[in-house]
Image (tube, rainbow, N blue to C red):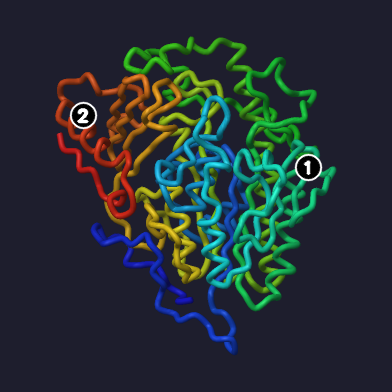
Amino acid sequence: MARSLWCAIGATAAVLVSTAVPVSAALPTAAEPDPRPNIVLINADDMTLAEMAVMDSVNELITARGTTFANMFSVFPLCCPAQASIQTGQYNHNNGVLGNGGDQWPVGGYQALDVDNTLSVWLSAAGYQTAFVGKPMVGYNQLDPLVVPPGWTEWHAVVGGDYSKSTMFQDGLKTSYIQYQTDLWTDISQDVIRRRVAEDAPLFLWTSFKGPHNAGPMEPDDPPAPRDGTPARADRHKGLFADEPLPMDPSFDEFDVSDKPSEVTGRPPLDQEKIDYLTVLNRQRLEALQAVDEGVADIIGTLAETGELDNTLIVFISDNGFMLGQHRFVGGKGVAYEPSIRVPLVMRGPGVPVGATRTHLVGMIDLAPTFVEVAQATAGLEMDGVSLFARPTSRTLVLEAGPREIDGPFYWTGLRNQRYKYVEWGTGEVELYDLRNDPYELVSLHTDPRYTRILTQAEAALERLHDCAGAECRTNAVLVG
């Protein structure tokens, strides 16, 4: 693979390509070593952008030695839809995964994804070894019988248990483990690397950690009757953040919510019990993340040990963010506010600038196009995203949660560009924020007569883009007041 794939950074306009366009290097013949890099994707679950501050190993080994994407967004901020976008490079209105499944999200789950046409299939067809370790899409464990999805050379997916124990479905067999879950998945990932890098073909490894997502077992220092639980921590990390105060930015327990939709106005101000719960939840989340941070270090250490580190593209992300009291939300995600949709993305490896920060908008839909380009693979569908190696340009991202046609507070769709965010809820309510002047989304401008023109433009842009596909999705909705 060409060692510098990054186009001229800083240009403001370019034609961006999201379908598979091979880079200039030719695929190897049977007699030649394969020059293409390994690809390692590591994700946390429900981790916020602010929590990158406690990820010492990630920051030392990836951030400082690679590139930070400061405006990375989970375009459908929920576990299963985010994984579907990673696997297809598509918005969820195109890949069909419009929720986690179940009563609240009836159009979603693993069963909604066309598993025969995903990233693993494309990379496998291009000659990559592929391995998955950790938490699969929601609903996978309900398959009967369990099967390994197409395109995976190795499959190590959790199908039961909690942080203290795991039932894994590994290449056709169920195996039970008694080990802290994050550590187990780190060990399996290291074993995959040690065995697979000795082969001639490059490796694509996706390690999907669960931390800091809430899960048991219950622990003695958990808050009484927690609203939605907390994440169990490894014993070695308990108490590390015992004195950590709860972050309270200006949107925390928002005082005046008269401009907000009913999903917010129906929430009472936070009482002391909720604040105490959020305080403990925040501390335990930071402690659960320490095992993820150590896992990243161990995986990178194994790449170095095997001599593959310099020939590996490493990407660290979170599937979505999390609400810790902002706008009165006591935990959770799946809403359009910044703590829910804005997530970490750092990357290191061949062709990636060192110590750089990019501020253009990128999204979960951009990972598959990146990996397809690096692997010189061919996508089996039209992707909506663009490679992270493409030249930055102005862009508007589509945001969504659930089918637009379903009424109700959980369903919404919207747009975000560098300055504005516009959201239409399933209830018919709308929000409009000028993020340059109001980064905490305290005052919706949808009733402000000074923003009537912007509102009209945003409504028209969303009507055009809410069901966009391919190149149409890669446009910029210019909103001018």
Of mark 2 and mark 1, the one earlier in the sequence is 1
Please report the residue visible at 70 percent of the width from the left and 19 percent of the height from the top.
223
User: Is residue 420 toward the left or the right of residue 217 in the image?
Assistant: left
Amino acid type, callout 1: Ser
Q: Can residue 294 be seen in this snapshot?
A: no
Q: Does residue 251 sit above or below 15 in this rendering?
A: above
Mark 2 to mark 1 CA distance (whole Å): 49 Å
Q: Which residue is mark 2?
A: 455
Position in image of residue 356 (x %, y %): 43, 58
Amino acid type, callout 2: Leu
Q: Nearer the viewer, residue 59 or 451?
A: 451
Please report the residue visible at 67 percent of the width from the left and 42 percent of the height from the top.
143
Judging from the image, what secondary structure is the residue with disc 1 in? Answer: strand
Q: Quadrant of residue 221?
A: top right
Q: Dots 2 and 1: beta carbons under 8 Å?
A: no
Position in image of residue 239 (x %, y %): 74, 32
Packing grade of label 1 (10 A; few <14, some 14-19, many >=20) is many
Q: Which residue is mark 1?
A: 166
Q: Quadrant of residue 52?
A: top right
Position in image of residue 408 (x %, y %): 42, 20
Position in image of residue 145 (x %, y %): 72, 46
User: Is residue 471 toward the left or the right of residue 229 in the image?
Assistant: left
User: Is residue 371 toward the left or the right of residue 242 in the image?
Assistant: left
Q: Which labelled disc corresponds to residue 280?
A: none
Q: Nearer the viewer, residue 212 or 400?
A: 400
